[in-house]
Amino acid sequence: MMKNKAVFYLLSAATFASVFSVTSTPVATSKAYASESVTNEQIPSAEVSVDGALRPIVFVPGTGGVQFNGSSNSYNYDETQVWVDRWYGTYIDDDELLYHLQLQPDGRTLLNSAAGTYVHRGNISAYQDHLQGIREVGDQPIYEKFITDLQAKGYVAGRTLFGVAYDWRLRYSDHFAMMKSRIDYALSQSGSDKVYLIGHSQGTQIIKHFLEMNPTYQGKVAGAVFVGAPNLGAAKAVRASSSTLGGYDMDAYYFGLGISPMTGYEISKNSPSLYMMSPPLKGESELQRTTAYAGTVIEKEVWIDGWGSVTKETYLAPSRTPEAAHTLAKTYQYNNALESEADSAYVTWDSQAAVPVPFHSIIGTGASTEVSYAVVKTHSFWNGDYTDIEYRYADGDGTVPAYSSNPSFTHSTNITATYITDTSGDGIHVDMLDPGSNTAIYALPHIMNFINGKGAYAPTASSLVSDEQKADAQAPQAMDERGVSKDSKAALKNMTRDALSFVTQQLDGEYVISVTDKKTGNQDKFTITVTEKGGAVIQREGDATDALGYANLLNSDKGEASLLGIQIVVDSAKDYDIELISGKADAEFSRKLYQTSTNEGEKTKRKFLEPLKVKKGEKLKVNVNKGESTFELEGKKVNERVKPE
């Protein structure tokens, strides 16, 4: 298998930039370092229940992570196996997939009733664990290592280890009855008092919304782990359901399987789960707040003269509100009824009380991840009129954007998180559960430590680790700074936060930002650099304040030049002095102010300030006092008492 296994994740492609989000739920970020290898012997054993037996695990895989079978027909040469089935062991037959997997517009009924497509769960009498159709999907061992390693730690299939083999095309709510059945069966077979739920990609959302909508089952769950959770959707889901945006080939080219993007589109366009994984309204809001992009879909028009020069460029949708962005994205998707249904579902989910079950999010970062598409309508003197699609990227696991996986959006009253960094840049959305030889990105150690109540897993140095890896593991990582220290967890309730955003095209510099709480005198320092591999790294010194620091690379709507985005977030009720020094080069910064409140009904406020050039070694000072910011450059006031509106 090739490294990127996103082939089977049509909606695990529920696919951004570093993000801070304030909700009414506290987030305690556990430090996790992705640079050390771990052996199976280093993975802790599991917590035991009151009677000494292992508390059972119920695993909910991602989209595409369950095998489908179907009736024997001219397409299905293996008689039953449909997803995934290589024709003569070489490639997948597009016609076979379309015959078996297409749904009618209602999102429930097979387009071809004779296909007889069904979820493969094995012989029910012999395989009540439901793992047979999950361990290997066709001939692809997506979750084989993960399940085998759990068994090596004492879990027994059908007694303490179970799967939820579901139809990943359907609505989340279609699987709630199965979730109840799996949990109850796991408790009866194990004799335990509670279960642990582990979800991957779409599976995380099924778990989250199941617990929201079924509070009587919350008491049966000891905890839930989310790996690669698309809490706020993913741009790839929009592309998959749009013929204009090109459809989605499920990344099948990594295997030479031959699935065309339009085959993916035909399967996706009437799949309700895909619309539920498209960015909702609050997903568009976070995309705008944390990147340079105006929305998941952007439209612009370009005129090119006979010399090949661009004479005019204009954006067709001048409104930059999240509502406008959400509406525009929906116009590019196929099924309007399923779009509306997904919007209504989000309203219902958001109205539920936060879940009192402990949640632990495992978030992949460091890989370029699709977040936005620019539909470019070009008028060329020589080539006439044509339309191109430009892809825009931000930070994530290669499939799910980091902002979408933000643990603040898991809707729990007890949240912890681990960040795993992709050092290759190829994407680790699937690899976190199927890491091959790169065990540094393996999610299982973090899962076991959560079960054991120990937070994130930080393996000790061993002979398997190089000196360079040890140094990396001991250094603060960019994604460690996305949560809130334990001392300030309670501060996230009923509070307002101010965010200062600086964006520059100068990528060669080193930027040092100090944050001082004026009342206590406590200070933290953030150092931001850009690596040779094209990633933004932020290192934090100290944990004396509740300030948060983020850094990420992004692209401008107006071109392909990379930009460095830096954001500092503080408590609006306090008084801070913030100092920025451009250490290695002159830099011009675009500046934005944000204010976000957890109080019900209050919307995010924004303020755009004029660009400001900071020369090498100069100090830009910002006093943030109860929501008002005053900027001074080398002692000269630039802006006084400005605030978001």
Image: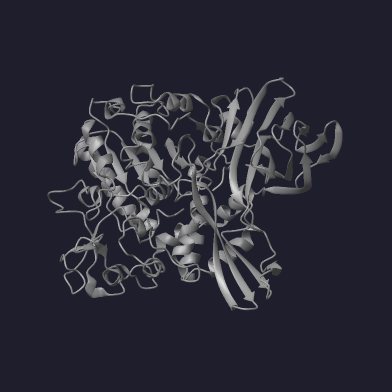
Q: Residue at x 54, y 48 (%)?
A: 16
Q: Above or below — where is 572 with respect to 394?
A: above
Q: Residue 309 falls in which quadrant of the image?
A: bottom right
Residue 394 horizontal/vertical position (percent): 55, 49
Q: Residue furthest top?
A: 521
Residue 507 horizontal/vertical position (percent): 64, 42
The residue lying toward the viewer, choosing from 66 and 431, is 431
Q: Above or below — where is 399 with respect to 155?
A: below
Left or right of 275 on screen, residue 637:
right
Q: Residue at x 66, y 67 (%)?
A: 317
Residue 599 visible in the picture: no
Q: Residue at x 20, y 60 (%)?
A: 89
The residue lying toward the viewer, choosing from 89 and 21, is 89
Residue 411 horizontal/vertical position (percent): 49, 43
Q: Above or below — where is 541 with respect to 98?
A: above
Residue 372 horizontal/vertical position (percent): 55, 58
Q: Residue furthest right?
A: 636
Q: Above or below — where is 599 with respect to 26?
A: below
Q: How is the image coloured?
A: one colour
Residue 109 visible in the picture: yes
